Amino acid sequence: MNADSPPLAIRTFRESDRPGVIALWAQTLGHAVEVDRDLDFIQRWSNARLYVGLIGDTIVATAAVGHEGNRGWLHRVATHPDHRRKGYARALIAQGEAWLARLDLPKVNLQIRGHQPGVQAFYESIGYVVEDRTSMGKRLVPVGTGLPVIDITVTHLEMTAAPRVPAPPPPALKLAVLRAEPISVPFYRYLYNTVGETWLWWDRRRMSDATLAAIIGDKAVEVYVLYVNGEPAGFIELDRRDEGAIAIAYFGLMPHFIGRGLGPWFLHWGIDVAWRYKPARLTVSTCTLDHPKALALYQRMGFEPVRQSKRQMVHPGHAP
Ligand SMILES: CC(C)(COP(=O)(O)OP(=O)(O)OC[C@H]1O[C@@H](n2cnc3c(N)ncnc32)[C@H](O)[C@@H]1OP(=O)(O)O)[C@@H](O)C(=O)NCCC(=O)NCCS
């Protein structure tokens, strides 16, 4: 960055950046279509990253990088017209290139539409060369085809007094429940990703390590891990950050431990722990993506549905 330019903060895209990024692209990349789709797409996979450059809270530059397993690609490089020639695009691209290099990608490519000498000069100034290639492409879906969206109905349940449901008999297995405290991000991701894979739990997959660490590192967030024969079989997460109420933020079993009678026993155990804090309310929610028996199980354990809400989610990706 040039010495006299205002400092540019660079980080990866967050969902709250969407309006700022769209506004910048509308102003700088007139040809860019389907920007919402592109932003969803970039977040969908782990082989792409969008870097944003901010001055204060304003997004003034972007650069996206990705790879197809062989070469890296650079796209969505844009700097707000009021902030050009300050080294911002160069700085963002440097971040993207460094990320690709860490993945051992040997090369990065890009395409420039038509003939734009200024843009070409910019890339040449940072080491890119025009190569003797013919650029070809083919559309696989017509412009305007959105990513598949799933309609989700969420049922919110609560109880306002400790239930009098007798504890289900513990399955005849070697069981232990341990609070992971403090829980590390990799171990949490292992639990969350393995339990949630079937049910499309994606919100926390998309979170950066720092954001996730701030949540799970909070003293008022308790993650209890169920062990069966010495290996993790599921977890329950109690969230006490909201004063007075406790939420069962997540509860689930690893796919390979479903069907052994562990669910009711472990859920009852978690509800019991929550009520020891004497909250005004204990809440949980379940959605139509969850196990079909989840709602009935929560009701059996003493929760009552209080409302339903609807939301949509872009499908996080298709299995091969
Ligand atoms: C191309 C673009 C991203 C450059 O952004 P920028 O933040 O101004 O670029 P930088 O300040 O990092 O430029 C670094 C160097 O590139 C060169 N450079 C940048 N723009 C240039 C231009 N228009 N002509 C010649 N050289 C240029 C200069 O050497 C510059 O260093 P200097 O200012 O110290 O001389 C910006 O002009 C833009 O957003 N254009 C419209 C969107 C676009 O076409 N994007 C590319 C899609 S492929």
Image (tube, rainbow, N blue to C red):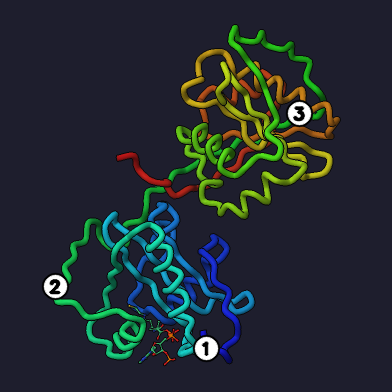
- Foreground mark, 3 or 1, reads 1
The residue positioned 37% from the left and 48% from the top of the image is 148
Residue 293 image point, x, y percent: 54, 22
Q: Secondary structure at mark 2?
A: loop
Q: Point out residue 280 in the picture as x, y percentages from the top left corner.
A: 84, 34
Q: Residue at x 65, y 10 (%)?
A: 170
- Vertically, is 298 above or below 59? above
Residue drawn at (43%, 63%), measured in percent from left and top?
Answer: 99
Residue named by callout 2 = 134
Tag 2–tag 3 contact (CB < 8 Å): no
Which label's residue is closer to the chain start, 2 or 1? 1
Judging from the image, what secondary structure is the residue with disc 1 in? loop
Quarter of the rendering containing residue 64: bottom left
Residue picked out by circle 1: 2
Looking at numbered disc 3 in the image, what kind of residue is underneath it?
A: Met
Tell me if 108 is positioned left or right of 269 in this view: left
Nearest the eye: 175 or 318: 175
Disc 2 from disc 1: Cα separation? 35 Å
Q: State yes or no: Cβ of the residue under disc 1 lies below 8 Å from any atom of ligand 1.
A: yes
Select label 2 or label 3 by which is in front.
2
In the rendered image, which residue does mark 3 sit on? 159
Alpha carbon separation for disc pair 2 and 3: 65 Å
Instruction: Give the numbered dot on residue 276.
Output: none
